[in-house]
Amino acid sequence: MSASGTPTTPKETLSNVNVTAALDVEGNFPLESVQIDGLVVLKIIKHCREFFPSPVTGQLLGLDVNGVLEVTNCFPFPGAKAEDENELVDGARYQVDMMRCLREVNVDNNTVGWYQSTYLGSFVTHKLIETQYNYQQTFNNKSVVIVHDVSRSTHSNLSLRAFRFSQAFMEAQKEDKFTTESLIKNKLTFSNIFEELPITVKNSHLVTALLHSLDDYEHVIPKSASLDKEKVVSPLSPNFDTLELSLDPYIEKNLEFLLESVEEHTQEQNTYAFWQRSVAREQTKIQVALQKRKQENVSRLASGLEPLPEDDIHKNHKLPAEPSRLDSLLITSQINNYCKQLNQYSGPTLGKLFISGELQK
């Protein structure tokens, strides 16, 4: 019922909820999904393929409405590398100038995240951690990073994934402390570093009508063109390349990256084991020194002298600091991504081989 005493209909209530969500300035509605315009997807693909295999990044623009992050525009960042300070300053100035130009032409200029390209799913890096943490800190957890894997897109369907950090990882990164105690306190593991959000691609009605018209090649090819219609393939015809029985080289390269990650993880484990041995040696030295001090104090008490303090022993024997577990978390998360990709591609490949074997009998 409204303030005037008149009953409200469910349609009016739903409209009020949508208006409240659209005016959600304080971020009370958590993000649940990402909606990208088709033109934005094409811009991201074009930018990533032009510089492949070098990684590239760009800015995402849009609006957060009712828990859905609507990405309506984007623009690329200049240069693939920014090692010089002048290049960093130029990049920041470029972003400011671009945002001002978009605002002048009345285009969405609200930053909602960024995107980057990757090769074979190798995107879990320190650079991504620092950049995404700054975005989420600045925009109150209402920003995502969209990862586009060009290599996977060329071998199968389009690969676009949206990620954000979990609250547990944000707390640990805020403390800048990735020790065993901190991981247990925040309940942080390699599996809950990221939260993946579902992505939907939205097209206008005119674009949808154009895609349906492209399926009829007679409307695409001019009538005056002297082409054999039997040899002309429709732009949206089914792709039968997935029925090939040859093993995808993508799997071989993925296995190589997986072995490299396992070696890096082994080095991290050796570093942690060395720290544990160092702590055990120092603790043994402390116990021996304490035992000698106790015996010495017993003899001093028997001689009528004051006992010596034991605090200086702990000051003289400091335990080595625990190494950061962040690298181990990132490597383990990357190994998990490689294993998922292998499972995704090797399963259908083996299935096709078994099917072909049965058909040949």
Image (tube, helix red, strand yellow):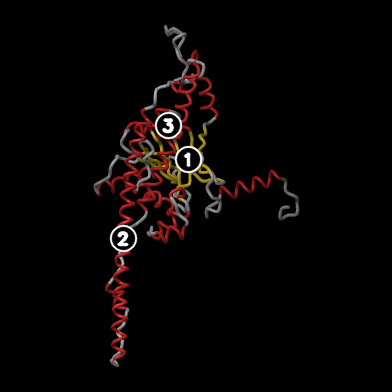
Give the residue furthest to the bottom. 304
Q: Nearer the viewer, residue 14 or 197?
A: 197
Residue 40 in sight in this render: no
Dots 1 and 3: beta carbons under 8 Å?
A: no
Q: Residue 282 at what x, y percent from top left?
A: 30, 67
Q: Nearer the viewer, residue 47 or 171?
A: 171
Snapshot quadrant of residue 340 = top left
Q: Which mark is residue 152?
A: none
Residue at 34% across, 57% down: 324
Residue type, mark 1 in image: Val
Is residue 39 positioned above or below 170 on the image? above
Residue type, mark 2 in image: Arg
Q: Spatial distance from mark 2 to mark 1, Cα to Cα?
A: 51 Å
Q: Which comes before the other along the chain, label 2 or label 3? A: 3
Residue at 48% across, 26% down: 351
Q: Residue 160 at what x, y percent from top left?
A: 44, 36
Q: Spatial distance from mark 2 to mark 3, Cα to Cα?
A: 53 Å
Residue type, mark 3 in image: Leu
Q: Which comes before the other along the chain, label 1 or label 3? A: 3
Residue at 46% across, 33% down: 344
Q: Residue 17 at what x, y percent from top left?
A: 63, 48
Secondary structure beneath disc 3? Answer: helix
Q: Which residue is mark 2?
A: 277
Secondary structure beneath disc 1? Answer: strand
Dots 2 and 1: beta carbons under 8 Å?
A: no
Q: Which comes before the other along the chain, label 2 or label 1? A: 1
Is residue 338 positioned above or below 315 on the image? above
Q: Determine crowd level at label 2: few under 14, some 14-19, many 20+ residues with C-alpha closer than 10 A.
A: few
Q: Which residue is mark 1?
A: 71
Q: Residue 44 at what x, y percent from top left?
A: 40, 35
Q: Which residue is mark 3?
A: 42
Snapshot quadrant of residue 224 = top left
